[in-house]
Image (cartoon, rainbow, N blue to C red):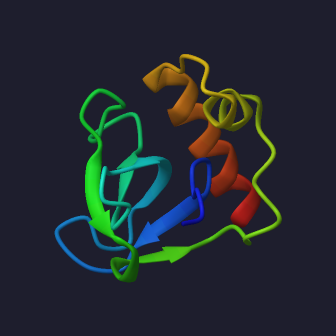
Amino acid sequence: MYDHTGRIVRSAAGREKDRIFCVVGMDQEQQRLLLADGKRRKLASPKRKKLGHVEFLTEHGHMYDHPAIEKLKQGQALTDKELRRALAAFRAKEV
């Protein structure tokens, strides 16, 4: 199964519909993504969401380049503040 860690997604269903998250991992069964935004969903307790309930905003081969996202992909410790800043920069770039 492909590792989606570091990709930016938009929730397409559920209570957090249309919110932007970063994929911080996958669950044990590789069926759900673990999502965090650093504010409502912290890195310590990420949201579990099925693959079909998210819309990927970054392409498969083209990840979003930000130092915090690189740290996450390399498995280094990341803070909620760093994640919030990375997502804010992505939103500013997207508009």
Q: Quadrant of the N terminus?
A: bottom right
Q: Is residue 3 left or right of residue 53?
A: right
- Residue visible at 73% across and 34% down in the picture: 70
Asked where in the image residue 63 lies, by quadrant, the reply is bottom right
Residue 76 position (above or below residue 19): above
- Residue visible at 53% across and 33% down in the picture: 83
- Residue visible at 33% across and 67% down in the picture: 31
In the rendered image, residue 81, in percent from the top left (x then y), is placed at: 49, 22
- Residue visible at 37% across and 83% down in the picture: 52
Q: Residue furthest left?
A: 15
In the rendered image, residue 74, in percent from the top left (x then y), is placed at: 69, 29
Q: Is residue 73 left or right of residue 67?
A: left
In the rendered image, residue 56, in percent from the top left (x then y), is placed at: 57, 73
Q: How many marks?
A: 0
In the rendered image, residue 35, in percent from the top left (x then y), is placed at: 38, 51
Residue placed most toward the observer, 24 or 8: 24
Asked where in the image residue 88 lies, by quadrant, the reply is top right
Q: Quadrant of the C terminus?
A: bottom right
Q: Is residue 70 left or right of residue 46?
A: right
Residue placed most toward the observer, 17 or 45: 45
Asked where in the image residue 89 lies, by quadrant, the reply is top right
